[in-house]
Amino acid sequence: YQPCDPQVICNRVNHVSTCLEELRQLAAKRRDELEESRQLWAFFQELEESAVWIREKSSILGAQGYGKDVSSVLKLLQKHKTLAGELLAHRSLLQRGKQILSEQSFGAVGIQEHILEVKAEWKNLEDQAALRLHHLQEALNASQFSTETDDLLAWLQDAYRLVSSEDFGHDEYSTRSLLKKHRDVSDAVDKHRAHVAALRQHLGALPVQYRDQEVRGGGGGGERFESLDQEMNSLMGRILDVNQIVQQLLDGGHPSSTEVRGCQDHLNSRYP
């Protein structure tokens, strides 16, 4: 038996230690590369899902209408707001992909091209969404215009029925009540004239297709304003007729002559 040379043993130990260190480094490198690959393929899967989502949303946006009234347009605007939030989320995905690619040491060429393709599709969807938002806002303005015009026409019809009534009261209390109602109507006429002027401006600001649609729809746009003008002029004429009747009541010694005179003065001061 001959004892082993201590130096030989030391060399072998050092060799084994070196091999173990190299193996550890290789294992660590392999682990890092596998993690990079996992992140890359996980991102690629998200990118594919995002591309499918973009195409689906693009198809939906192209097929949706713009609502028929204020309520339906507001609901569509709320849905569009949700879509805008989802678009921001997908934008962050593309930004994260750019960061992932900058950290990759392999396999980035094909992914880079695919990211550019999806980014172009996403940009088209964003432009499509912006255009739809613009059209929805136009539709909302048009619906609000239509609703306000309908409300004004309804008021005019009610007011005309009131001033066209042949009821002039049967006692002091009833006459006083009718005088108050008539005075309220005459006060409201000027306010609604300003409203008609504002609606004319509103109509002029609507896109051409909505102005044309209003006119073609029957009782819309220009026709409705002709109707409004006719109603306002007719209402004014009826108020003046009542003014003449008031004068007749005064000449006939009506028992509520003070209130009647006050109504006439009020009418004459507003509509000389």
Image (cartoon, grey):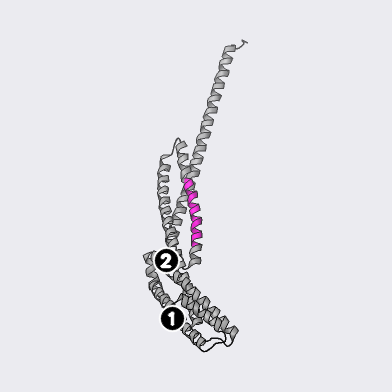
Q: Which amino acid does label 1 sit on?
A: Gly
- Residue 175, compared with residue 74, is above or below; it is below
Residue drawn 57% across the image and 21% down it: 17
Left or right relative to 99: residue 10: right
Q: Does the magenta stretch include residue 76?
A: yes
Q: Residue 271, position in %: x, y?
A: 45, 76
How packed mark 2 is, by other alpha carbons closer than 10 Å (few <14, some 14-19, many 20 or more), is some
Which of the image's four quarters has the C terminus?
bottom left
| Residue 49 visible in the current orientation | no
| Residue 36 visible in the current orientation | yes
Front residue of 224/252: it is: 252
- Residue 184, compared with residue 42, is above or below; it is below
Looking at the image, tell me whether mark 1 or mark 2 is earlier in sequence order: 2
Front residue of 36/215: it is: 215
- Residue 179, compared with residue 118, is above or below; it is below
- Residue 197, compared with residue 113, is above or below; it is below
Left or right relative to 180: residue 195: left
**Residue tagged by mark 2?**
202
Residue drawn 53% across the image and 25% down it: 22
Q: Do the residues labelled 1 and 2 touch (CB within 8 Å)?
A: no
Q: Residue 111, position in %: x, y?
A: 43, 43
Q: What residue type is labelled 2?
A: His
**Magenta span covers which residues?**
75-93
Left or right relative to 207: residue 260: right
Main SS of the magenta part reads: helix
Q: What secondary structure is found at the residue carrying circle 1? A: helix
- Looking at the rendering, which quadrant does residue 216 occupy? bottom left
Q: Residue 210, position in %: x, y?
A: 39, 67
How packed mark 1 is, by other alpha carbons closer than 10 Å (few <14, some 14-19, many 20 or more), is few
Return the mark for residue 174.
none
As measured in the structure, the alpha-carbon distance from the residue carrying label 1 to the one carrying label 2 is: 27 Å
**Residue tagged by mark 1?**
237
